[in-house]
Image (spheres, grey):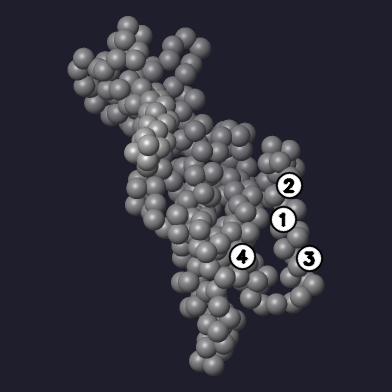
Amino acid sequence: MRVLKKTIPHLFLMAYLLIILYPFLFVLFSSVKTDNQAIASNPFGLPSSIIFDNYMNAWVNAKISTFFFNSLYIGVLSACLSILFAAMLAFAVTRMRYNRISAVVFQLILLGMLIPNNSLLLPIYGMMRNLNVLDTHMALILPYVANAIPFSVIILAAFMRSIPGEIEEAAVMDGLGSAGMFFRVMLPLTVPAIVTVFIINFLGNWNEFLLANYFLSKEELRTLPVGMVGFRDAYNTNYAQMSAGIVFSVLPVMIIYAVLQEKIIEGVTAGSVKG
């Protein structure tokens, strides 16, 4: 009975894993098929022959390389800036105690998470137009950074509260000021939470479509989600090359999770385990 109780949950998990992975396998197999006819004739089957030309054509002819590096640059820079600002704000709220002021500031940060992002599209557009940054990458970087700060502050503040106060006392005894304590003590100790926040923010920036679609009209500035729409026109859709483009869009996410999965788990659980 004990063996059966342990086996049944694993069977359910394996079935769930297959359901989750099947769409990706479908896209992966489609990306190495010859053309749309091969996909249409056997959409769920293995490819009869593996063709890598779809990846080359998508990377060069469909300008996936340009869209890919635009998304990578915008996603990484926005995530890093949001972490820097959020970490400084979390440090001020949790470790530089101003009693009522800190509580009010933190409540305002929580309030920022209650506003739906889509409802801010028109105000953000007006602000970007007034700043004269439309049709530049700054039109995406500024909203991405601002949008990520509330969530980032909550995660980082929860982690910083779990750090013992004795560490601060030792840093003060060593002659460190607020800036030195933040950059030399708090940031290194908060790395697990920073990695978690970075990945979540990066994925949000990487997959964002709405702002990128409306704020950028020049093709050379577009991000990967918007560029993927270019595969479709009024007459035809190249599903093989589209599948290759989707694989390119998934690769950074898979690499990040494969390399940093331990840090992700540690950052999510550390704040609740300590303290």
How dense is the environment of label 3, judged by Cα within 10 Å: few (below 14), some, or many (20 and up)? few
Can I make out residue 149 in this image?
A: no
Left/right placement of residue 240 relative to residue 124 reads left
Give the residue at x 72% y 55%: 110
Single out the residue that lies furthest toward the left: 49
Classify the position of the C terminus by image quarter.
bottom right
Q: Which mark is residue 104?
A: 3
Mark 2 highlights which residue?
114
Please say if the residues under marks 4 and 2 sit with CB atoms less than 8 Å apart.
Answer: no
Mark 4 highlights which residue?
157
Give the CA distance from mark 1 to mark 4: 12 Å
Mark 1 highlights which residue?
110
Residue 156 location, x and y as percent? 57, 63
**Mark with earlier residue (1, 4):** 1
Left/right placement of residue 54 relative to residue 49 reads right
- What amino acid is found at the position of numbered circle 4 in the picture? Ala
Give the residue at x 51% y 31%: 226
Give the CA distance from mark 3 to mark 2: 16 Å
How dense is the environment of label 2, judged by Cα within 10 Å: few (below 14), some, or many (20 and up)? few
**Mark with earlier residue (3, 2):** 3
How dense is the environment of label 4, judged by Cα within 10 Å: few (below 14), some, or many (20 and up)? many
Kindly state the secondary structure of the residue where label 3 is placed: helix
- What amino acid is found at the position of numbered circle 1 in the picture? Leu
User: Is residue 97 depicted above or below 174 in this figure?
Assistant: above
